[in-house]
Image (spheres, rainbow, N blue to C red):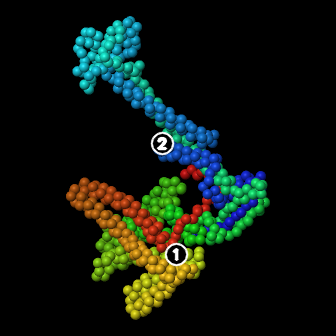
Amino acid sequence: MITKMKKLTFLVYYKEYEEFLSQIRELGVVHIVERQCGEMDDTLQNFMQKRTLYKNTLASMYNLAEKTVDANVHAGVSADEVVSTYEGLQNKIQDLNQRVPQLDKEIAQMEVWGDFDWKVVSSLKDQGWDIQFFMCSEKDFDEEWIEQYNAIKVQERGGHLYFVTVNHGPVDLEMEPIRLPSQSLSELNAAKESLLQELAQANAELKNFCKTHYHTLEEGQLQLQGEIDLWKVKLNSQRMAEGTVVLLEGWIPVDNEEEVKKFLDASGVYYEIRNANKEDNAPIKLKNNVFTRMYEVLTKMYGMPDYAEFDPTPILAPFFSLFFAFCMGDAGYGLVLIALGFVLKKKMSKSLSGMMNLVITLGVFTTVIGAVLGTFFGVSLFDLDLPDSLKQFMIVGKIGETTYDKQMLLALIIGVVHICIAMTVKAVCSTVRYGFKESLSAWGWLLLVVGFVLTGGLSFFEVISENVSTWAFIIIGSISAIGIYLLNNIHRNVFVNIGAGVWDTYNMATGLMGDVLSYIRLYALGLAGGMLGGVFNQLAFMVNDAAGPALGWLFCGLILVFGHVLNIAMSCLSAFVHPLRLTFVEYFKNSGYDGKGEAYRPFTTIKKQID
């Protein structure tokens, strides 16, 4: 359900405004009304840019720390210092990485000449000998150079010949001498080894820094977010009476009204408080029981309801669980989800352990529905030697002498019920928001669809006679037609209403048929998962029979574990996505749900919780 809200209006003397904001922030229950419409001053823009920098740096630090960080926060180190040091370490590593290719190039250049001492070359030069290094293709080398210029062949590689000349002066061979590095090969290799050690040390230093200072920067980011929130509140304030008085508006839940009144009365600030109207764009705070609260995350994925709408979560919760269980369709897989949920709940962080309650709940639904559908780890329970008292609860096989599957019919029935509930919600919500006269079309369609479904069902099971059902169809259709074709908009001409009703009839007829058929996916996915599990079972025991008693059981176990783990993973994915689609498309469309509400975000002090 949606928590009722109260509208607050404050008038604060400008000299007391800063202190008042601090007190409101400590109170932590007031949702400030934003007036800016996207405008941003330089200070806020700088804050936002810094927040982006902190966010990106935190993501990089978390990965570099291999997702294992210390829980300590260094009080004497600011967030800017952490970012500056981090960037300095990154620049150092980048510089070192850039020097490695240059050293590799110089080493490759010196390898063809061997490891010689440049001091010897320098000593010969002091004695009047000029040593030059050349390279040419093998065919271009002139053997006369050996006698003429004291050419000495050093190495032949890749069709090229490397040689040196030793003379009392430079020689002219119509080719440029090679300029070699100033270090010998052994010195270059030693320099590279030292550089790699320095690089490894720098990477280790960066990793350790990220691990030890991650939460320090995270704390700084939270403090920065608090500054951003405070500055937004200041920008959303309106100065009046030549700037001497500041006007501020906000929302509070009715549960906090007495607490806020007590605080405001003690502060001496002038304020007004009133109930939120349907027309107000009041923020949304959901308040549900323990079971329904787990599914609020799905509602938030689509969008929060408007203040005048209904919270869809209480209806979403049981149907999503039913859809998920139907798509999984295996009691054994449900037990796996329950066990997995309990194990991960103990190992995961506090913020994520709550999601495991949802996993456990979905596992319970899957176990029950899987037993009803008669499947346990791909094995048909109905074919086992079980008591008839248990088999009578299983929905398996065909409908009588027909070729229609009972589970397919059940999926369609669930779809019809789901859509009828959606249409009921639409009619009721439309009446609450706009009044009964403005909602006659929605009530007409609801009466037509639900009335025809109930009448057809009672007639099919021979609860009512054919004559009674005929008259029921006529009466229901006639009454519904008044709302659909004549009174769908009481402010328009009747002929325009008739035309609009005809168009709505076409859309409703084609849309409802497609919506109902969409629920066959529940049956199809459950059937596919069960069949795939059965295939893995058959394959495993075929291998067991072929490989003998020793290796047979080993390979059989591996195939069973791998096959069912793979099947569970794929089934979980489809069992989450497709029920979500049935909710977001079929249900929300037929219930008229917009999901454009604003979430309740109180202006409060942000506190970091280290898991």
Q: Is residue 496 above or below residue 78?
A: below
Q: Which mark is residue 426?
A: 1
Left or right: 312, with 26 as reference point:
left
Extreme bottom residue here? 467
Is residue 331 visible from the viewing direction of this image? no
Percent of width and height locating residue 536: 29, 61
When asked about the image quadrant of residue 403, the answer is bottom left
Task: Estimate the spatial distance between the alpha carbons at disc 2 and disc 1, rounded to whole Å.
Answer: 51 Å
Residue 478's place in the image compared with 407, above or below, is: below
- Asked if residue 545 lies left or right of residue 341, the reply is left
- As shown in the figure, which amino acid type bears the numbered disc 2? Leu
The residue under the point 35% across, 9% down is 169
For the point 66% across and 69% down, which residue is it? 276
Q: What amino acid does circle 1 point to?
A: Lys
77 is higher (above) or lower (below) than 307:
above
Rendered image: mark on residue 64: 2
- Picture coordinates of residue 321, whole percent (x, y): 45, 68
Residue 282: image x %, image y %? 62, 66
Residue density around tag 2, few if under 14, some if 14–19, many if 20 or more, within 10 Å: some
Q: Are marks 2 and 1 in contact (CB under 8 Å)?
A: no
Residue pictured at 60% horizontal, 55% vertical: 38
Is residue 180 depicted above or below 498 in this figure? above
Where is the N terminus found, in terms of image quarters? Answer: bottom right
- Which is more toward the observer, 98 or 239? 239
- Between residue 252 and residue 516, name the one nearer to us: 516
Residue 46 visible to the viewer = yes
Kind of element beneath mark 2: helix
**Mark 1 or mark 2, which is nearer the start of the sequence?**
2
SS for tag 1?
Answer: helix
- Of residues 23 and 581, the one nearer the viewer is 581
Looking at the rendered image, the disc whose residue lies closer to the viewer, 2 or 1, is 1
